Image: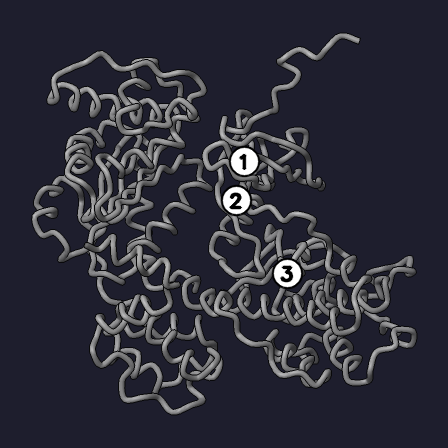
Amino acid sequence: MSAPTPTTLVKPRISNRYELLSPLGAGGMGAVWRAMDRLTQEEVALKRLHSSTWQPASDDLRLSLAHEFQALAALRHPGVITVRDYGFDQEQLPYFTMEILPQARPITVIGEQLSENGRIQLLLQLFTTLIYVHRCGIIHRDLKPGNVLVDSQGNVKVLDFGLALTPGVASLPSGTLAYMAPELLRGGTATVASDLYAVGLMAYELWAGWHPFHHETNLPLAILQQAPDFSLLGLSPAVQAVVQRLLAKEPTARYDSAAEALAALCTAVHLPLPPESMAARESFLQAAPFIGRTAELACLEAARQQAVQGHGSGWLVVGESGMGKSRLLQELRIVALVNGAQVLRGQAQANGGAYHLWAELLRPLLLQTAPTDLETAVLHAIMPDIAGLVGRPVRPAPPLAAAAAQARLHLTVVDLLARAAAEQPLLLVLEDVHWADENSLLLLEQFVTRCQQMALCLVASCRLYERRELLARLADLSRLDLRPLAAEAVAELSAAMLGENGRLPSLLHFLQRETEGNTFFIVEVVRALAEEAGRLDQIGALPLPATVFPQGIQQVAQRRLGRVPPPYLRLLKKAAL
């Protein structure tokens, strides 16, 4: 047998960035691959559609994958899988990447190896995750063992949000038949209760080892009419009562929420409520639903859509620290990605090196474009590792005087971005430009004058009072000012973080007085109250203090620095000198 040729050893790539290593699983819609991200040198899971199932005349599969990415991108919780990137491959089939879960297996498979207490702990984790998901206004609609995995550390992870909906949205019955609630088979709307029914089925399987209706030939009829048999499970009466209530045929007979089910299960096994981990608490604080900025998002998205038609523009999002600039740009990025745009992001850093804002932005672009030898040589000055990105040696650029070399560099960057925008609509996101170095700002000023001639939308963010002269320098950018949240938005954000307690008039008055609608301060005040109360759900049940931060933002900064481990704190102090 002849030796394999070099071409047979080349691993397939997606967008020249993700190298497919091995399949992780497949379904009717698509497949999930273990892949290497060539930009970060990290392994990820890549989900893409089967080319054989893709029909150009139908957008159903594309919309499903885009919807799943959007739902997951809005969620950040230890119990929900994390998504990273979204794009289209060479066949224009959509894909997205997410964290990889080594040795993860379905919850029911792991449960077979565990004691009763171990199974209880898995259910408690799942309920805790669903409290967050439902608080964010999302109904999963396809909870089943294959979508609830347990990783090698024993952590429950919920995935596959392709069918997820917001509560109250009418839809056709969808999901996996064996895990659909009776009301869905009757044409009802998916609710929190239908998600809890699916959890009840998995709970039954954890002890029985099989689905309660696995032997039925008419599965829909059994789901609608037959009561599960608990006689062989050996459950305590209290735990059995919890599972039976989860499996009630009528949704109104089930628990009102995942939080109520969690409390009932803890009571049944004589356990206190699980401690609120810092990561879980931060999920509610930092990843609440997008609130109070829909008009601003619509404005920027309209500009991005105009850029697709060839009418490019540049924008400067301006606001005081804590007004939600980063979250607005994050939401814009998600919308742009699922609508087929390439998104390049640069983050300015205090005391960053020359052109650091642009060097970060260009890195993913170089994997997808074909820079010439001269372009790579010119860019080497600001990207010393460019040879690894383009996959070939880089020779020195012809020497020029300083001013001419700078002009050549600027022209090279502008030309690269113009070529990229000609091939695919482009969104450039430049965050915190008030920290940008002078060279980065000079390039930005030059680039702004070219935006209108490209299929490109540039959106930068800047603090209002950080560098006053910057607003004048960037006057050619359309300005979008972020104001404090209105009282209604403060109430909505408070409820998203705290549930119904977040709507208590006394708490809302307190938040409005302490924060004046500043999103950052709202989160910090709620965080401080949670630290005092012990749990987020206890805020409102205890008397409120007269004030939280009597010394204002300086005290907030001191509190945050107090959470930094000592070795890192020493580095921060040195960096601040």
Quarter residue 494 falls in: bottom left
Q: Image point 20% across, 61% down: which residue?
A: 320
Pick whichever, 140 or 372, lies toward us: 372
Pointer 1: what residue?
94
Q: Is residue 389 above or below residue 127?
A: above
Density class for disc 3 (Cα within 10 Å; few <14, some 14-19, many ≥20) is: some
Q: Between disc 1 and disc 3, whose residue precedes?
A: 1
- Residue 155 is tagged as 3
Task: Work out whether residue 174 can be spotted.
Answer: no
Quarter residue 267 falls in: bottom right
Q: Is residue 291 above or below residue 363?
A: below
Pick whichever, 88 or 185, lies toward us: 88
Density class for disc 2 (Cα within 10 Å; few <14, some 14-19, many ≥20) is: many
Disc 1 and disc 2 in contact, CB within 8 angstroms: yes
Q: How is the rendered protein coloured?
A: one colour
Q: Between disc 3 and disc 2, whose residue precedes?
A: 2
Pick whichever, 482 or 191, lies toward us: 482
Residue 568 lies left or right of residue 172; in this view the side is left
Residue 140 position within the rendered picture, expressed as x and y whole percent measured from the top left: 61, 60
Pointer 2: what residue?
66
> What amino acid is found at the position of numbered circle 1 in the picture?
Pro
Disc 1 and disc 3 in contact, CB within 8 angstroms: no
Q: Between disc 1 and disc 2, whose residue precedes?
A: 2
Residue 507 position within the rendered picture, expressed as x and y whole percent measured from the top left: 35, 84
For marks 1 and 3, give the CA distance. Answer: 29 Å
Label 3, secondary structure: give it. loop
